[in-house]
């Protein structure tokens, strides 16, 4: 495990990708738990297992295929991550965000990041798609920030601005696509916890109290690094289950529930992602 990465590490990983394809990806896409089938609609590209890319973190979680797919979708050259690594798997935050740096070296301008999340807003239902309008970097506030260590000046400043983590123009595009396609689209604030244990009832009440609408164990580290490097970001959460914040009865949450919800969410997310890609 490496403490910090340099430009040479990112270039080595990007070099392996360039050996497999001549495409110059413009858009990066990260798929969360149960959302791997979205990559199946990418055409004419290369499929590279993470283990074949230098320094790339290999996911160990069910529902994350662990492959990089480079090809075309809706006329755009894309690089798609079928699954991601998480801090709770034992990786450092720098390792979790390493693939985003590689995608930046490959030349992406836009990152579309998806995840499976627990709904906290009382009006949310399992199967909803939530447009991420902002996030609460709870683990980053506690010190687990992927930008910790020597600053990589070639990507961005020591103290990057995070006043607009999710691009407003991309959000408008996503809302327009959803309306035209008749796909319900919620909006809200995502909060990232370290995991892997799910939240206690007291946790959930606290998260709702501080303004979170959905909770998960990913996304924020990748978005932080993306914005540091000047990449525009669109975030979408698939609401896999709804936490009964006000309920006094305990409700068990399982990873199987998350994966099952993904099967419902994939068609809705695909419509939105395809529409946004067409409009770029």
Image (cartoon, rainbow, N blue to C red):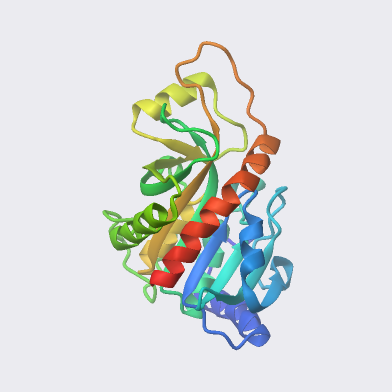
Residue 257 visible in the picture: yes
Where residue 275 appears, as percent x and y from the top left, is 45, 64
Quarter of the image with the C terminus is bottom left
Residue drawn at point x = 67 percent, y = 43 percent: 259
Q: Nearer the viewer, residue 121 or 125?
A: 125
Residue 146 visible: no
Q: Which picture quadrant has residue 186?
A: top left
The residue under the point 51% across, 11% down is 248
Q: Is residue 258 above or below residue 225?
A: above
Residue at position x 26%, y 54% from top? 163
Q: Quadrant of residue 213?
A: top left
- Horizontal arrangement in the rendering, residue 160 relative to residue 14 (left or right): left
Task: Using the image as rendered, state which of residue 24 and residue 225 is in the foreground.
Answer: 24
Residue positioned most to the top: 248
Instruction: Say how many tags the image has.
Output: 0
Locate residue 224: give its quadrant: bottom left
Q: Position of residue 212 (x, y in %)?
A: 39, 35
* Residue 272 vs residue 218, the one in the foreground: 272
Left or right of 164? Residue 187 is right
Where residue 190 appears, as percent x and y from the top left, is: 42, 42
- 105 vs 118: above or below: below
Q: Quadrant of the N terminus?
A: bottom right
Residue 47: x %, y % from top left: 70, 73
Establish if 76 lies above or below 115. Answer: below
């Amino acid at each position: 495990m490496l403490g910090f990465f340099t430009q040479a590490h990112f270039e080595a990983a990007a070099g392996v990708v360039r050996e497999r394809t001549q495409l110059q990806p413009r858009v990066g896409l990260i798929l969360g738990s149960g959302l791997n089938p979205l990559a199946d609609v990418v055409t004419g590209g290369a499929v590279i297992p993470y283990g074949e890319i230098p320094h790339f973190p290999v996911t160990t979680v069910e529902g994350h295929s662990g492959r990089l797919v480079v090809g075309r979708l809706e006329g755009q050259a894309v690089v798609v991550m079928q699954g991601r690594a998480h801090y709770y798997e034992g990786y450092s935050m720098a390792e979790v965000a390493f693939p985003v740096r590689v995608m930046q070296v490959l030349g992406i301008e836009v990152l579309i990041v998806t995840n499976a999340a627990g709904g906290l807003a009382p009006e949310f239902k399992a199967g909803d798609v939530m447009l991420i309008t902002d996030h609460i970097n709870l683990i980053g506030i506690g010190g687990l920030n992927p930008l910790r260590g020597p600053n990589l000046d070639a990507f961005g400043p020591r103290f990057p601005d995070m006043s607009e983590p999710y691009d407003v123009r991309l959000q408008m595009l996503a809302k327009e696509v959803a309306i035209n396609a008749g796909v319900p689209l919620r909006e809200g604030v995502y909060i990232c916890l370290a995991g892997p244990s799910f939240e206690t009832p007291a946790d959930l009440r606290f998260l709702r109290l501080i303004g979170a609408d959905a909770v998960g164990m990913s996304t924020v580290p990748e978005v932080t690094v993306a914005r540091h490097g000047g990449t525009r970001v669109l975030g979408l959460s698939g609401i896999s289950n709804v936490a009964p914040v006000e309920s006094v009865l305990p409700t068990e949450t399982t990873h199987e529930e998350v994966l099952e919800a993904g099967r419902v969410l994939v068609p809705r997310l695909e419509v939105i992602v395809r529409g946004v890609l067409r409009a770029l």
